[in-house]
Amino acid sequence: MPKLIVICQSGGKFVAAGNGVLSYSGGEAHALSISRESKFDELKGEMAEMWKYDPNSIIVKYFVPNNNRTLITVSSDKDLQRLLDFHEDSGTVDVYVLTNAEAAANETALTTTSIGKSAKATASRSRAAAASRRRAREEAALGREQEQQVATAELEQAQVMNVGEAATLTAAPGSPLNITPVASIITDGTPAPPRQMRTSTPCALDVIGEQKLQKVWETCVTGLHQQFNNVGEVREAFRRYSLAQGFTIKFKHNDSMRVSAKCKAEGCTWRIYASKLSTTQFFRTKKFIDTHTCGAGTASAAPPHASRKLVATIVKEKLLSTPNFKPKEIAKEIQEEFGIELRYSQAWRGMEAARQELQGSYKESYNLLPWLREKLVETNPGSVVSLNTSDDSTFRRFFVSMHSSIFGFENGCRPLIFLDEMSVRSKYQSELLTATAIDGNDGIFPVAFAVVDTINEENWHWFLEQLKSSLSMSQSITFVSDRQIGLRQSIAMLFQNSYHGFCVQRLSDELLKDLRGPYTQEVVDVLVAHMYDAARASTREGFLKSMDSIKSISPEAWEWILQSEPEHWANHIFVGSRYNHISSGVAESFYSWVPEIQMPIVQFVDTIRQKIMELIYTRKVESEQWVSRATPILEEKLQKEIMKAQSLQVFASQTAENTFDVRDYFGSVNHTVNVELWSCSCRDWRHNGYPCSHAVAVLQGIGRDPYDYCAKYYSTEAFRLTYREPINPVATTNRPVHGGGLVSVLVQPPALRKLSGPPKQRRIRNKGVIKRPLHCSKCKGAGHNRATCHVFS
């Protein structure tokens, strides 16, 4: 990578604004360069030599991008690499060097109340100090979660950014902070002049949630000598400022070296000009006339013109907090906040432009799939990630199974996988295939997923091939899926000794689709309920009873169900182990956001990874609070069986050892329990994985603990093993850019998604009004009618 220029500063002062943002002025600066090969001790030695400091007494800190409230400490080579990750795209970075004494003095200054101030000022500083301590605690909590590989999207960024010791420096507004700044990076190697820290920072996203956009954007332009990181930041700040102030700007000069804008109103004197600093990428305002002669900013002033770029500027901030905003909702908020009225089409186009700015091009995103594949495997060793394209490099499918998911399934989950599919909201043809398991607390556990261009047998076979290569277990697996997706041969071929169960929910949907006759909704609901009862029935008698009920309502439905191969979905004859889960749609709650949000494929895949990461971390933390040997769901279910067992009588068999007869007190129900075989004639023990009430009565009668006869997957130990391995974040700061020579493999997107419904008919309008000619019914003449006829008048 190219070298990063570090501007090392010392001797200045920090001043905290009312919102906690730090600005810097004064001091002196020196520049040096670093690269991936640089070592921290060597860098610290150079910095110490600049100001004649003892290398062992200095502390190196820097700001993360878009956050001038938190200083991050660099104390090792790893921390230095993280600094490069954050700032390599900007080319420069500001670093601050403090001695131990100065750091202690600053910390004291931030938390100590000055003597002699008024009571109001004292209270203000106390609140600021409390806020500082609260933020410090929050930072510390984030640091602890980072060490545990936390799984929230926000925490993922913290894992990348808060690498070293993080200290939040805040103070009462206007109070100086005398610290020794370390490094500010420029490209010419000359000391940077005294300046304020990026005063465009008040526009940063970290304060958007605290105030309305309009209030925040009013501070995007602060005056002369304001510094910006690049030309894009200049343009964005000018647009936001004009929006907040209620006028429209027109760019006069707008290139890579200078940006000048004026108020669009005829004859208005408002002007602003910013240009690039020599040999750097920074921009600074050189001219600013903040006076309007057009009435802008007054109550009578007209709202700004709603151009697409202007709408995109507003929408971009709102989409960050609410990605699934609808155009109508966007238009309503913009009207309320800025007084700008938008048509639906304007809001929609603005949202599309904002999404492309935030997420990048949908088409170019496919070029990043090879990079994402390498990064996922690099950051999470043991993961299986596959990319498949056609001969012309057109995308076909992308498979992901994280190491954490593989380990959790093989070591803590039941050998049960649910296969499902759903459509992905995208401009290109995209579908999602999922493989999901169930943990010991009956919670969903994502094992693998794939984005494919279409749903067909070939793609499902490829998906199962990748899944097979991911798993090393030799145990038989039970699959539950839709019987119509052509998986029978693939499952039998790839997973020997496995079992294939049909999803009863999809079967009932098929039944209702094929069922003919004038059935009311109430009758249909009864048919479906009986079908579910037949599926769950543990015995042949229970199955036949439910089927008889169906036959009495609809012989056609009864015949259809008998032809649907009950051996693949009815409990009493299905040979696999479904643990009484009969529907493949268990993962719908986890993937429920998929049809609602549209995003490029790389971001889509990484969003799923983030959500799995969050799920694993959250459940890991929850299980640490459990004190029982079994999961909460098993505790609840087993307690119900224990209560039922109190009304049962147990009789030891006279003919077979470890075999018992169990009856109720009326003697009307009789079941046989074999303790050694973990079986009961009711078959619920086998289907559920924990003792039924009959087995509980026997076990308690012979002095044994029912918990010892539950499947191992229900234990707290197995649950914790399921979520033991964390998913590591994927840093995106070094993401390659297409066109810059960094993307060697090109992946073309699949075909555009076809719009549903009939094609729109183009309406051809007449060029003129064509009148129907008049005909007379009396004389049969033309040009007049019966009322105006003169022939027979």
Image: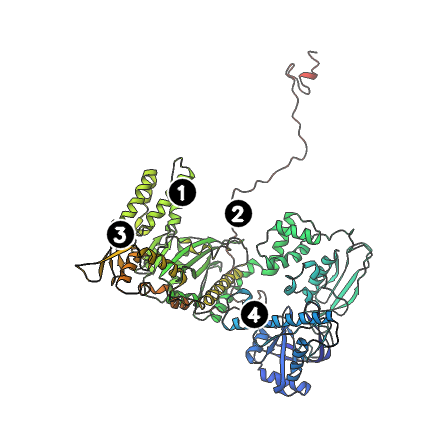
Within 10 Å of the Cα at label 1, are there few (<14), some (14-19), or many (20+) other Cα atoms?
A: few
Q: CA distance from mark 1 to mark 2?
A: 33 Å
Q: Is residue 60 left or right of residue 730?
A: right
Amino acid type, label 4: Ala
User: Which disc is residue 158 wearing?
Assistant: 4
Which type of secondary structure does the marked residue at label 4 adopt? helix
- Give whichever of 270, 367 is nearer the camera: 270
Image x and y of residue 463, in percent: 41, 59
Q: Which residue is mark 1?
A: 525
- The amino acid beneath tag 2 is Leu
Asked if labels 3 and 2 touch by Cβ distance under 8 angstroms, the answer is no
Under circle 2, the secondary element is loop
Within-10-Å neighbours for mark 2: few <14, some 14–19, many 20+: few
Q: Nearer the viewer, residue 380 or 647?
A: 647
Determine whether label 3 and label 4 are within 8 Å by CB.
no
Q: Which residue is mark 2?
A: 755
Reading the chain from its start, which is encountered first: label 1 or label 3?
1
Q: Quadrant of the N terminus?
A: bottom right
